[in-house]
Amino acid sequence: MCLAGAVVGYFRALSTGPVSTVVPIFGMSLVGGALLGIVVLGEGVTAKKVLGIAFGAVAVVLIAT
């Protein structure tokens, strides 16, 4: 249900805003979801997870610039 809402919001944002702004913000939702899993759900933090989250954030920043 949340994913369906996110996809609808994504397409709505694409219809109202520039793609160069919308896509990086949507990409950060993956990083945000991973961080919420650690903070809210109490998932374990490993070096591999931190590295993956960091690479995801760097990728989004590189795409946005």
Image (tube, grey):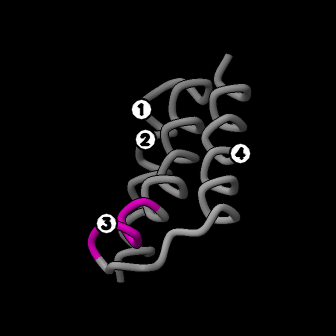
Q: Quadrant of residue 40?
A: bottom left
Amino acid type at image mark 3: Val
Question: Residue 21, relative to residue 22: is it above or below?
Answer: above
Name the element at disc 3. Answer: helix
Residue that carries the numbered disc 4 in the rendered image: 55
Quadrant into which the N terminus falls: bottom left
- Magenta residues (range): 35-40
Decide: marks 1, 2 in contact (CB < 8 A)?
yes
Decide: marks 4, 3 in contact (CB < 8 A)?
no
Disc on the earlier residue, 4 or 1: 1
* C-alpha distance separating marks 3 and 1: 32 Å
Residue 39 location (% of width, % of height): 31, 66
Between disc 4 and disc 1, the foreground one is 4
Residue occupying the point 68% across, 16% down: 65
Residue that carries the numbered disc 3 in the rendered image: 39
Residue that carries the numbered disc 2 in the rendered image: 13
Q: Which residue lies most toward the front here? A: 47
Amino acid type at image mark 2: Ala
Q: Which residue lies most toward the top here? A: 65
Question: Residue 62, relative to residue 44: is it above or below?
Answer: above
Amino acid type at image mark 1: Thr
Residue that carries the numbered disc 1 in the rendered image: 16
Residue occupying the point 51% across, 35% down: 22
